[in-house]
């Protein structure tokens, strides 16, 4: 067989193996999570873009089913039960606003996510009242998405209380800025592969340890060098929007599974997904940038007289409470729901306005 023919045959075999592997991964994702490229082909994607609201939401009135997770949505495209059109005089509406940790991306059933568990605790405490805890979390949402969600979808619900758990999605923006800067300097064309290719994602995730080891210090961002003005402004924009509408709110800082007092190997294992999605930070940098974001969140909330629940200090780390770096396990979801419930009791949040610690002093 001639040399060129061997090369061509090798390429065909390699392409064939790649397609078989990709098909197997897509099928596995469909079986486990009910989400794959097959959903795109059948127009039954997990998420849909709502043109009127300019928001990405879950596919409305759907049961997105897989062996590892079943996501049931209401007509608004939220992972919540259907909300009555009319709000009764004694009804209480509590909204949990955020991103994937609120939505419960890796939680198997709706009944196991934070909003459902919180509603169960509130129902037990207020048996004579109808209480709806609305899950307003969508995976991938940053602060600007969350503010739009609040203004366009939540405000018309006439909520009695808002609980804000923002998540860490805005941190990945620092890495995207660096990538754009590097591309500008090098001026080299970059091949863009389809985002739905699971085989590429699998290789990238499984080679994280190699890329982390081989990365030069020039590829790592020093958190102290980051300009946090945009993050602070986005936090202020949502806080001021809530304050303007005089809706009581509890602000929660963001927890993570890996702690600086853990053994290094444990930290590296627990932080793997965080380092994958925020590849421009090393482990020490992730700790620092997470803490800086939480500090700004707490400081700005207090400036607006919103009480703060220090979830980053109260939720234990480790596999027992987290499914990965930042998403809660079933036990973690229940733990967080109980923390919120106890804080709402302490603040008398459902018996009147949420009061700050200063206002409660005699």
Image (cartoon, grey):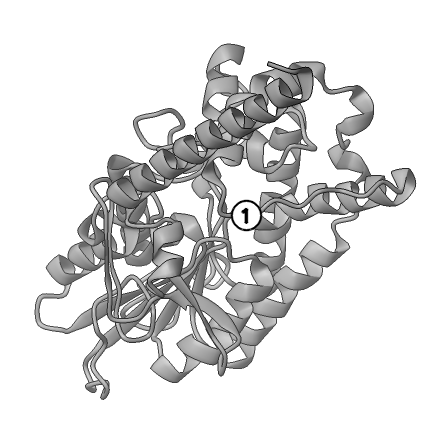
Where is residue 6 drawn, in percent x and y? 60, 18
Residue 293 seen anywhere in this rendered image of the structure: yes
Residue 126: quarter of image:
bottom left
Q: Residue at x 38, y 38 (%)?
A: 23
Residue farthest to the front, as pictured: 1
Where is residue 217 drawn, in percent x and y? 79, 21
Residue 205 seen anywhere in this rendered image of the structure: no
Q: Which residue is drawn at 21% across and 67% down?
A: 81
Q: In this view, does 102 lie above or below 136?
A: above
Residue farthest to the left, as pictured: 128
Q: In this view, does 81 lie above or below 228?
A: below
**Secondary structure at numbered mark 1:** loop
Q: Is residue 269 above or below residue 289?
A: above
In the drawing, does residue 360 fall left or right of residue 144? left
Where is residue 230 drawn, in percent x and y? 73, 57
In the drawing, does residue 93 fall left or right of residue 169? left
Count of numbered circles in the view = 1
Q: Which residue is drawn at 38% across and 72% down?
A: 353
Front residue of 216/161: it is 216
Where is residue 216 drawn, in percent x and y? 78, 19
- Mark 1 Cα within 10 Å, few/some/many (few <14, many 20+)? few
Q: Is residue 46 above or below residue 279?
A: below
From the image, tell me which residue sits under label 1: 195
- Quarter of the image with the C terminus is bottom left
Q: Which residue is drawn at 75% across and 28% down?
A: 220
- Quarter of the image with the N terminus is top right
Front residue of 246/95: it is 95
In the drawing, does residue 64 fall left or right of residue 137? left
């Amino acid at each position: 067989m001639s040399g060129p023919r061997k090369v061509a045959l090798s390429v065909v075999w390699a392409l064939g193996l790649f397609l078989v592997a990709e098909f197997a991964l897509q099928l596995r994702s469909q079986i486990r999570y009910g989400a794959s490229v097959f959903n795109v082909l059948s127009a039954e994607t997990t998420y849909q873009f709502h043109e009127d609201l300019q928001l990405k939401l879950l596919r409305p009135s759907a049961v997105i089913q897989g062996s590892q997770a079943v996501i049931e949505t209401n007509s608004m495209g939220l992972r919540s039960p259907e909300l009555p059109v009319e709000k009764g005089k004694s009804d209480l509406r509590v909204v949990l606003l955020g991103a994937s940790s609120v939505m419960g991306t890796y939680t198997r059933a709706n009944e196991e996510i934070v909003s459902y568990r919180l509603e169960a605790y509130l129902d037990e405490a207020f048996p004579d009242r109808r209480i709806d805890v609305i899950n307003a979390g969508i995976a991938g949402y940053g602060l600007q998405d969350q503010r739009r969600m609040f203004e366009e979808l939540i405000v018309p619900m006439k909520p009695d209380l808002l609980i804000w758990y923002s998540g860490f999605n805005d941190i990945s923006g620092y890495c995207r800025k660096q990538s754009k800067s590097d591309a500008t300097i090098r001026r080299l064309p970059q091949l863009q592969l389809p985002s739905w290719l699971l085989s590429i994602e699998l290789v990238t995730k499984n080679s994280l340890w190699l890329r982390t080891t081989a990365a030069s210090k020039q590829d790592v961002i020093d958190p102290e060098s980051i300009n946090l003005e945009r993050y602070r402004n986005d936090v202020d924009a949502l806080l001021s929007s809530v304050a303007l509408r005089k809706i009581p709110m509890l602000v929660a800082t963001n927890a993570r599974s890996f702690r600086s007092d853990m053994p290094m190997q444990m930290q590296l294992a627990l932080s793997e997904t965080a380092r994958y999605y925020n590849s421009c930070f090393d482990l020490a940098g992730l700790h620092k940038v997470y803490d800086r974001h939480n500090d700004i969140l707490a400081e700005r909330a207090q400036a607006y007289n919103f009480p703060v629940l220090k979830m980053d200090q109260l939720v234990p780390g480790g596999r027992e409470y987290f499914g990965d770096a930042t998403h809660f396990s079933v036990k973690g979801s229940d733990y967080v729901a109980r923390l919120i419930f106890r804080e709402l009791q302490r603040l008398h949040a459902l018996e009147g306005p949420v009061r700050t610690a200063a206002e409660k002093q005699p």
